[in-house]
Amino acid sequence: MNRFAEKLKRSWFKFAESKISIVGLVIVLAVVLLAVFAPLVAPYYDHCGAYVNFADANKAPCSQYLLGTDLMGRDILSRLIGSLRSTLLMSVIVLSISVPVGFIVGSIAGYYKGSLLDTILMRITDIFLSIPSLVLAMAIAAVLEPSLKNSMLAITVMWWPWYARLAYGIASSMKAENFIIYAELTGAKLPHIIFREFLPNCISPVLTKMTLDVGYVIITGASLSFAGLGEQAPKPALGNMISTGIDYLPGSWWMTIFPAVTIILIVLGFNLLGDGISNIFNMEDN
């Protein structure tokens, strides 16, 4: 226990060396807490649904509505806070599916590098990678009914190949290592080699990439929502809020600027956090 506590202390010290990593951690924690406690924190949480109040429609930021209201009289701040749940849920679901699928496919192909199985798996991966990710996601989402669930599915389909390519590079470079050869000689099966030998050596790059990818998933999800292929009104979605407000620039600037700034802050927070996590693993490698 003391050894674990000491290792944890050293990891935190390395992470805290970079002040911008602390800023990223604070932003991420704030976003997560706001998403979890949205009904308690949002000033007008009922505005996150089918709510209409034309008397307060299109109001500029004021003491009652700190970030103004939209065309339906709904509080922008409350809807931004309410949108964080679906935004983070999308990232969690997409990565929790794409990372294991990509890791397993890449590890198997890397372990059997040069074989027919390697060729088939990696050519399929290359086909997905050859298509611009956002275009592929939009094409899949356009075929399906616009919803949060279907936008998650569309992003997941185009996200796993990046982890397959990452795992493939690590596995193919490790397959000739002595500990892999020893595991084979002792009769270890493929699942043991993948999850007990490859996986511990993939944690550093995969975890760092996952942290950075949260921001990219959010941007992709917002892009689908902006195009009308994501979560639909009256539920709050950052991309949809920007799409609605963009027609009223520059007069009603708050309808577009504040959702856009929210996306920027979330992506920035996770990117800075990812840099800090990368520093921790770099320390362990050294």
Image (cartoon, rainbow, N blue to C red):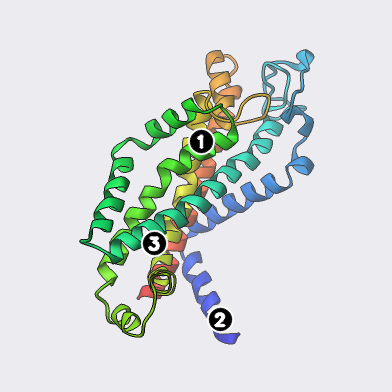
In the rendered image, the quadrant that contains the C terminus is bottom left
What residue is shown with label 1?
Answer: 221
* Residue at 47 percent of width and 25 percent of height: 142
Distance in Å between CA atoms under marks 2 and 1: 38 Å
Left or right side of 3 for 30:
right
Instruction: Name which of mark 2 and mark 1 comes first in the sequence.
Output: 2
Q: CA distance from mark 3 to mark 1?
A: 24 Å
Q: Earlier in the sequence, mark 3 or mark 1?
A: 3
- Mark linked to residue 4: 2
Q: Residue type at mark 1?
A: Gly
Q: Which mark is residue 256?
A: none
> Mark 1, residues whose alpha carbon is within 10 Å: few (<14), some, or many (≥20)?
many
Q: Would you identify the image quadrant in which residue 190 lies?
A: bottom left
Of the two numbered discs 3 and 2 on the same chain, state the one appearing first in sequence: 2
Name the residue furthest left.
114
Any part of residue 96 in sight = yes
Q: Residues within 10 Å of mark 3 (few under 14, many from 20)?
A: some
| Mark 3 residue type | Pro
3D distance between C-alphas at marks 3 and 2: 22 Å
